[in-house]
C-alpha cells in the first residue's frame, strides 16, 4: 500500500530541476541579484500589490514586517499585538523579541481564523499603538469584514500572515492585499516553493523602503538612487562611506538567486496548483458530508475561496471518533497526518515564562489544540486517495 504523504513529493518537478541545472550551467551570480528582483516584480503582479520583498523564509518575513512597524511607529518598545491563538510560533515571537505585549484571541468556530468579538474590547482597554495579526489557517480565508471595520475605527496596523494560503480570496480579492503588510512562505510543500523563502508585501512606499533596508543590514543599497540621495543628504553621508553606512538596526535576511529562480518557475503554475488544492478540499467536503454531522467540523469560509495547504477537521471527544482512534486508523491506512500548527499557542512551553502576554479563555482554540487533525490535500492526490483517507477517518478502511 503506497503511503499518502501530507506534503507532495513532486512539488518541485523534473522540469524545474532541468531548468535549474541549465541555468546553473551559465555560472550565474548566486547571492541576491536580478532573479530576486524579477521574482519580486512577478509576485507583486500576481498578487496585486505595489511592493514585494523576498527574504529567506516565511518566518523571516514576519520578523521583517514587525521590525518595519516597530521602526516606523513604536517608541521604546511600547506597543501591543493582538494575534490569533491558532497560529505558528513565528507569528508572535518577533513581537516578543521586540518587547511588545501580546494578547491572543480565540479562533472563529467557522473559519478557525481570528475571532474579532473580543478585539474591540482589547482596543478600548489599552492605549496603542496596536498591531493586529490575521492568519488564514491552512489556507481557509479568515473573515475580514468585521476586522476592517474595526481598523477604520481604531487605526491599528494590520499584518496578514498568509503563510501558505496563496490564492485564497475574500470578497473576490486575494488574501494578502487587505493589510498594511502581508507575509507569505515558500517552504517545500506549500502552493509554490523556493526551497526556503518568504515574501513581505505592501502598498506603502515608506514601509517598502524600510523593509529593504532592514532585510540587508540596515543599509540603503537596495533603494533607488533618489531614495539613497535623500538619505545621504539627511545624514550628511559622503560618497566614499555610502555603501557602509547603516541607517537602521537591520538583519541579513536576504535570499539567493537560486531560490528566486525556483520561485519564478513555480509561480508559472501557481494558479493551477491552487485550483487542484481547492478541488481536493471540495472532494473532502462532499465525501464527509455523506456521513453526517459528526465529521462536519472542519474550517470553512462564508465569503471566499479556500486554497488549502491541508484538510483539517475536529475529531470527537471520546471513543471511535476520538483523535487517538482516528490517528490509529490513519496510520494503519498509510496516511500521514499531523496536529494543526501549534494549536492554541498559549499552551506552548515557550510562552509559559513570557510576562507580556494576556491569556484569555479560548474555547475554540483549545478544541483545535486537543482534537484537530490535518490530512493531505496537495495537487498530487487522486480521488481514490481522498476516499481512502475519508474511509480511515470514519472507520471503514
Image (cartoon, rainbow, N blue to C red):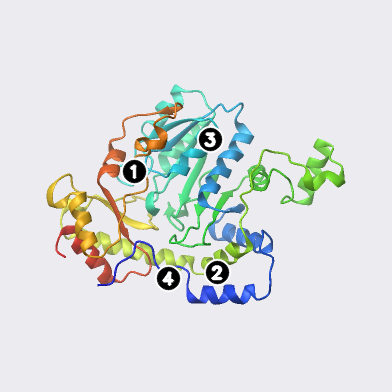
> Seen in the image, is 67 located left or right of residue 377?
right
Q: Quadrant of the N terminus?
A: bottom left
> Front-most of 242 and 277?
242
Residue 304 appears at what percent x and percent y? 39, 53
Q: Quadrant of residue 65?
A: top right
Comes first in the chain, label 4 or label 3: 4
Q: Residue 149 vs residue 19: left or right?
A: left
Report the front residue among 188 and 204: 188
In the image, residue 92 lies at what x, y percent? Answer: 47, 39
- Single out the mark in the foreground, 2 or 3: 3
Rendered location of residue 199, percent (x, y): 56, 53
Which circle marks residue 10 in the picture? 4
Residue that mark 2 sits on: 265
Name the mark on residue 97.
3
Q: Tell me if I can see residue 89 in this picture.
A: yes
Tell me the residue at 86%/46% (across/down): 239
Amino acid at each position: 500500500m503506497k503511503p499518502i504523504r501530507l506534503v507532495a513529493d513532486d512539488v518541485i518537478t523534473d522540469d524545474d530541476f532541468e531548468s535549474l541545472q541549465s541555468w546553473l550551467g551559465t555560472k550565474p551570480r548566486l547571492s541576491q541579484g536580478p532573479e530576486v528582483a524579477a521574482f519580486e516584480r512577478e509576485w507583486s503582479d500576481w498578487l496585486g500589490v505595489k511592493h514585494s520583498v523576498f527574504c529567506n523564509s516565511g518566518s523571516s518575513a514576519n520578523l521583517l514586517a514587525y521590525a518595519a512597524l516597530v521602526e516606523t511607529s513604536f517608541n521604546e518598545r511600547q506597543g501591543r499585538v493582538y494575534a490569533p491563538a491558532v497560529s505558528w510560533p513565528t507569528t508572535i515571537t518577533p513581537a516578543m523579541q521586540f518587547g511588545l505585549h501580546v494578547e491572543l484571541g480565540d479562533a472563529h468556530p467557522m473559519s478557525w481564523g481570528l475571532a474579532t468579538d473580543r478585539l474591540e474590547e482589547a482596543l478600548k482597554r489599552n492605549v496603542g499603538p496596536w498591531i493586529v495579526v490575521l492568519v488564514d489557517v491552512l489556507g481557509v480565508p479568515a473573515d475580514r469584514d468585521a476586522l476592517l471595520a474595526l481598523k477604520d475605527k481604531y487605526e491599528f496596523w494590520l499584518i496578514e500572515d498568509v503563510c501558505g494560503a496563496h490564492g485564497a480570496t475574500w470578497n473576490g480579492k486575494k488574501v494578502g492585499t487587505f493589510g498594511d503588510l502581508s507575509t507569505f512562505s515558500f517552504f517545500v510543500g506549500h502552493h509554490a516553493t523556493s526551497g526556503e523563502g518568504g515574501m513581505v508585501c505592501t502598498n506603502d512606499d515608506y514601509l517598502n523602503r524600510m523593509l529593504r533596508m532592514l532585510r540587508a543590514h540596515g543599509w540603503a543599497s537596495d533603494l533607488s538612487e533618489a531614495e539613497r540621495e535623500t538619505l545621504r543628504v539627511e545624514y550628511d553621508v559622503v560618497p566614499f562611506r555610502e555603501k557602509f553606512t547603516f541607517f537602521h538596526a537591520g538583519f541579513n535576511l536576504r535570499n539567493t538567486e537560486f531560490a528566486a529562480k525556483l520561485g519564478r518557475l513555480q509561480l508559472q503554475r501557481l494558479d493551477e496548483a491552487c485550483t487542484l488544492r481547492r478541488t481536493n478540499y471540495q472532494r473532502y467536503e462532499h465525501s464527509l458530508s455523506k456521513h453526517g454531522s459528526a465529521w462536519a467540523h472542519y474550517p470553512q469560509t462564508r465569503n471566499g475561496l479556500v486554497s488549502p495547504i491541508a484538510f483539517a477537521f475536529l475529531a470527537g471527544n471520546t471513543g471511535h471518533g476520538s483523535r487517538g482512534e482516528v490517528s490509529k486508523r490513519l496510520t494503519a491506512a498509510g496516511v500521514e497526518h499531523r496536529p494543526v500548527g501549534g494549536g492554541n499557542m498559549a499552551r506552548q512551553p515557550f510562552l509559559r515564562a513570557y510576562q507580556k502576554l494576556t491569556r484569555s479563555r479560548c474555547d475554540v482554540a483549545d478544541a483545535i489544540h486537543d482534537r484537530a487533525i490535518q490530512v493531505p490535500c496537495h495537487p498530487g492526490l487522486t480521488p481514490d486517495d481522498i476516499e481512502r483517507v475519508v474511509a480511515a477517518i470514519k472507520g471503514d478502511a
